Amino acid sequence: MASTPNIYSIVQDYYGETLNSNSDLQTSACCSSEEIPSYLKPLLKKIHTEVHTTFYGCGSPIPLALEGMTVLDLGCGSGRDCFLLSALVGESGAVIGIDMTENQIAIAEKYIAYHTEKFKLERPNVSFRHGYIEDLSASGISDESIDVVISNCVVNLSPEKEKVFQEIFRVLKPGGELYFSDVFSDRRIPEELMSDPVLRGECLSGALYTEDFRRLLAQRACPDVRIVSSRPLNGFSEAIERKIGMIGFHSQTIRAFKLSDLEDRCEDYGHLATYLGTLKESPHSFLLDNHHLFEAHRPLRICGNTASMLCHTRYRDHFRIDGDRSRHFGLFPCDSVAVDPRSLFESSTDGRCC
């Protein structure tokens, strides 16, 4: 069995020594092909070139409604997402980036003043800490101090994922959100592949089996996680395909909330949700997950869990929720097959949670 210290050393060497830029990656697993939201593109142009070229990520895990929030980026690397977040949280917010690779932290810290000026902030609102995502207390992150935790293709690199999620839900405030992109597998990875430097560094052999991920979140009293986006990973080299080609991989963006009233099934209490169109980055619609695209001012039937996600979190001011849990109508009529969120505009007002 591969030792935990060996895995940490493999990852640190791969991202601190083996890779000089994202052009050195051998697969697309740790390199984002997801279209970045249009409102972020002007900000992205202001990111320093060195930060860009040393960025390794598989998605765009930056949610809406961040002004004034305290955001924690797990495995921040050279800080690209942290600097984008610094512009979004504004003067009253704060961004903390944590990474175990000293070379990456050094690059991020070098450009704090540069991005403070670029985003016209009066003072820096972003800080970086060398540390481990499995032990956030060692980096000074206290209980229930964080509004939003993000991560971009990093959790798969950890050999102690249970500790990672335990720490995430410790530091999140009640109603706080975990919003992250990562690589997931359709089965458990064989033990003998865990310590392969290339497979580990390329975000494949540490990928979470989807059902084990569901179980880990359930252990943290989070029985309902939502897929925001998903894309298959393929086109690997012959050498990588020979080693791990029997496994199916997906890059997914996931959101989960720290809420005490979530149930393990979607239950129907007769709730209706109406997006008020008040988020400036997305005035016409709000995407909760790949089954819920809320058109502004158009009511949508939702389950009790979805109602809680919208009215007991920072999104509360942007929605009108009609109904409560005083009357129960059984299981919510969920669709078991994921759909293109745009198709919701062509359907009835029935939401789909599952």
Image (cartoon, rainbow, N blue to C red):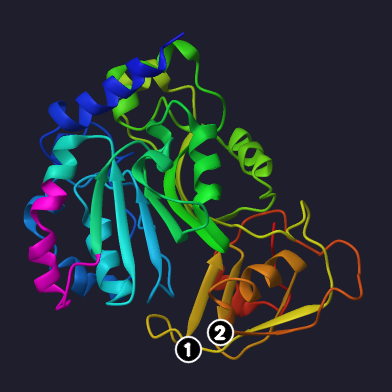
Distance in Å between CA atoms under marks 1 and 2:
8 Å
Front residue of this view, candidates 161 and 173: 173
* Residue 88 point in image, percent of width and height: 31, 73
- The three-letter amino acid code for the residue at tag 2 is Asp
Front residue of this view, candidates 192 and 243: 192
Reading the image, the residue beneath label 1 is: 278
Q: What quarter of the picture does the C terminus occupy?
A: bottom right
Q: Which residue corresponds to the image point at 31% horizontal and 56% vertical from the top-left?
A: 96
Residue 36 among those drawn in magenta? no
Q: Which residue corresponds to the image point at 50% horizontal and 15% vertical from the top-left?
A: 190
**Image quadrant in which you'd find residue 47:** bottom left
Residue 110 among those drawn in magenta? yes
Left or right of 96: which side holds 43?
left
Of discs 1 and 2, which sits in the foreground?
A: 2
Q: Earlier in the sequence, mark 1 or mark 2?
A: 1
The disc placed on residue 317 is 2
Q: Is mark 2 on a helix, strand or loop?
A: helix
Q: Which residues fall within the magenta stretch?
A: 107-125
Q: Is mark 1 on a helix, strand or loop?
A: loop
Q: On screen, 50 above or below 197? A: below
> Mark 1 and 2 residues: CB-CB less than 8 Å, in contact?
yes
